Image (cartoon, coloured by chain):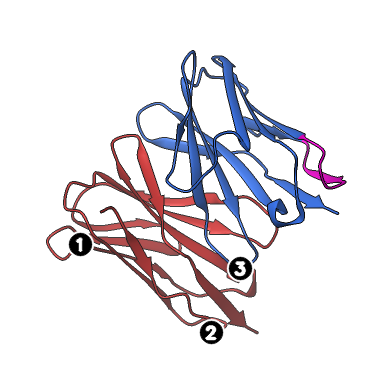
Chain colours: A blue, B red
Amino acid sequence: GAVVSQHPSRVICKSGTSVKIECRSLDFQATTMFWYRQFPKKSLMLMATSNEGSKATYEQGVEKDKFLINHASLTLSTLTVTSAHPEDSSFYICSAPRGNEKLFFGSGTQLSVL
Amino acid sequence: QKEVEQNSGPLSVPEGAIASLNCTYSDRGSQSFFWYRQYSGKSPELIMSIYSNGDKEDGRFTAQLNKASQYVSLLIRDSQPSDSATYLCAVTWGNDMRFGAGTRLTVKP
């Protein structure tokens, strides 16, 4: 079964609203989680690294005020897309490493902003 | 600069043939290498991991790593239509994992 749970799987929202996506590690503690976005027929683009108990590390070009990340517990990281616009429509995926090397992915969230 | 490069394809092979997917990476300090398969609209799923030079076989899949050439490949034997997907190469530097752009594979019946 899934070891990383991501919700919701699909969300449609109006422009200007905020959307929160949750990523949970189910049977292990994840001090680090990763957030990616993926456009159609493109590869995963790392947006940020979420660190439990501290600030997230954002990749160059990713607006931290636009994409708020909170990693308040060892099993939960959230990504909030604030004031979403149509260009934010994308597939968002989280992942968490279990052990030293194995990386597990959430099922992804398809965001559509109207 | 940590970069992972793949030929985006599309790569088309007939059913039963061998599909060969290639990946190069930029930094010799990389530690671990992975191949993920991603179906459209789904998240990636791990197929193979390889950590040392040489070949690693798992069923119809063989991963090949050559650290001197900074090259990792995936061979799929007896390709099936269900293997049609995008294959992502991933390379880690510590906790930092980078993905290639992916190669789209189509296996024709």
Among the 4 quarters of the image, the one containing residue B41: bottom right
Among the 4 quarters of the image, the one containing residue B61: bottom left
Image spot of residue B23 (x, y percent): 33, 66
Mark 1 = which residue?
Answer: B70
Q: Nearer the viewer, residue B63 or A42?
A: A42
B70 is within the stretch colored magenta: no
User: Label 3 to label 1, Cα distance in Å?
Assistant: 25 Å
Label 1 amino acid?
A: Gln
User: Along the horizontal axis of the image, is B39 left or right of B91?
Assistant: right
Residue at 46%, 64% in the rendered image? B101
Label 2 amino acid?
A: Ser
Residue at 59%, 73% in the rendered image? B80
Where does the magenta region start and end?
A8-18
Mark 2 = which residue?
Answer: B12
Query: Can you say whether B13 is above or below A47 in the image?
Result: below
Please tell me whether mark 3 sits on a helix, a strand or a loop.
loop
User: Do pointers 3 and 1 mark residues of a single chain?
Assistant: no
Image spot of residue B56 (x, y percent): 30, 55
Mark 3 = which residue?
Answer: A41
